[in-house]
Image (cartoon, helix red, strand yellow):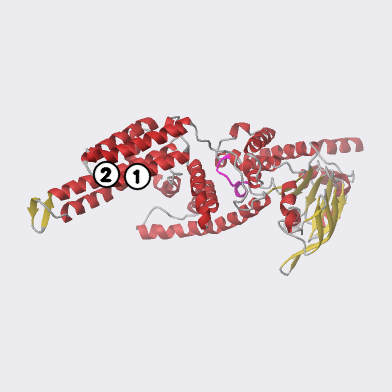
Amino acid sequence: MPRKEAWGAVFKDITLGQYFPEDSILHRLDARIKLGICFALLIVIFMLKSYLQYGIMMLAIFILILMSKVPLSLYLKSLRPMVILILFTGIINMLMTDGQVIYQFWVFKITYEGVTMAAQMLLRIVLLVVASAILTYTTSPIVLTGALESLLKPLRVFKFPAHEVAMMMTIALRFIPTLIDEADKIIKAQTSRGADFSTGSPMVRAKALVPVLIPLFVNSFRRADELAVAMEARCYNGGDGRTSLHVPRIIARDYVACAVCVLVCAGVLVVNYY
Amino acid sequence: MIEIKDLTFAYEEKQVLKNISLDIPQGQFIAILGHNGSGKSTLARMMNALLVPDSGELLVNGVNTKDEARMMEIRRSVGMVFQNPDNQIVAAIVEEDVAFALENLGVESSEIRRRVDLALEEVGLSDYATHAPHYLSGGQKQRVAIAGVIAMQPNIIVLDEATAMLDPKGRRDILALVEDMHKKGKTIVYITHNMSEAIKADRVIVLDEGELVLDGTPREVYANTSAIVDAGLELPRPCQVTTALGLGVALDIDESVELINASK
């Protein structure tokens, strides 16, 4: 009965980020640089005004997609959850913007400005999603966590717990697969004793999950306790004075990537004045 | 070297350890036996300053575990391996987990690299250095945990029921690794309720309800059949057979066969 497996599959489908292992220039780039570049691109995307600017940006993003060696279909997949948002903002923008009316029925007016606005919003959302997908497809979540920690470190001056946040993310990443396996085992154990997770209304099925979540929840407290003891036994004492196995080094190609990024961003912003 | 003097400890009302005195010289392979709730895990945690005695002392290489200023010194010289392999691996990549203690201690990166590679080689997991731990078997995960301890270069290694959740193969691998570390001069404190895992130890002590009831070589201790039954433990099968036949203690099957043949 394939349906019986369905809930197990639900848990299995929670992917760890969306890293796509490949050997591309983008994959090898220092994660901190990649984060910085991605951030810069996102800001520039928000500042785009003319179609020319959008064109240049789309070309730049497209080149990045090719460089990432990640199949185009995956990028399209990353856009799928955004479809409703894109449609919704598009329609709202088309109908709510005042200006030169091009089509009218009952109380609704579609204006030239509204269509422009909707088109730009659509392009903007697509660009934002794809730009961040490039980062997450080419950087493993573990490396990304490390990069975040080192970028957030200066904020410790303002008492921001950079190390603690990074440690929490690391432990979460480490335990997600373990907890998924455990949930799977509990589901199988309860299914074998006659529990039904796959029939009934959504409400009934959600209720059926309660006896799965409770042992999972209780167990994770036990795990947390044991892990804390094990960490203490291994001399964990917070972030102060910690060193690291991997010291990421910024090399020539990282500087080149930075320079290219600055040029492209500056170019895109300046092109409107000519 | 661990010196325990008149140690007592209670969780709230319950007296878990009662007047334990014990000296473990450097390089000894000692097995601590006891059934569930005998206080053996509590004693293990005392050795790493995770718990401190209510009264009495526990000294690790001459340092009192009550001396909070020197706690890190104690923890770096006493490596701990726990029961559940899943709940003691911190990092999402094998080599990063092995490096965890060294990172905490502020060891320099190149030295961490060197020691992590050596430790992984010692436990035979060099090929898995960049794997995610959840793809490993229980025995392999436990070897990752041991590698993390070896990398710290402690002179004492405490294994708290480290094989309890493993399959027979994983169990054998861990025991072989423990013997190997013992040969390299480490003090081994091996905590278990399985008496057949303790036969390779230099010395065996038995805890019952927080009291130290037996202390000696495996051969000496296993001869006290009634005390062992009282402590809620079970002699290894070959030993059960030979003692039931009145032939004395046999530590493994070969020895029991010899004893039985000799008695004919």
Q: In the image, what residue occupies the spot 12% across and 51% down?
A: A111
In terms of depth relative to the viewer, which is nearer, A41 or A7?
Answer: A41
Query: Which percent across, then down, holds residue B169?
Result: 67, 38
Residue at mark 1 = A42
Q: In the image, what residue occupies the spot 27% across and 36% down?
A: A56
Say if the magenta span includes residue A154: no
For the question of whether residue B138 can be seen, the reply is no
Can you tell which quarter of the image residue B257 is in? Answer: top right
In terms of depth relative to the viewer, which is nearer, A182 or B188?
Answer: B188
Query: Which percent across, then down, holds residue B123?
Result: 68, 35
**What's drawn in magenta, residue-wise?**
B85-93
Q: Is residue A61 left or right of residue B74?
A: left
Residue at mark 2 = A48
Q: Chain of mark 1?
A: A
Q: Which mark is residue A167?
A: none
Circle nearer the N terminus (2, 1): 1
Is disc 1 on the same chain as disc 2?
A: yes
Mark 2–mark 1 CB contact (< 8 Å) = no
Q: Is disc 2 surrounded by few (<14), some (14 to 19) or many (20+) residues within 10 Å?
A: some
Identify the element where label 1 is drawn.
Answer: helix
Query: Which percent across, then down, holds residue A68?
Result: 39, 32
Query: Which percent across, then down, holds residue B108?
Result: 65, 40
Identify the element where label 2 is drawn.
Answer: loop
Can you tell which quarter of the image residue B129 is in? Answer: top right
Q: Is residue B9 left or right of residue B96?
A: right
What is the quadrant of the C terminus of chain A in the image? top left
Check disc 2 and give the amino acid type. Answer: Leu
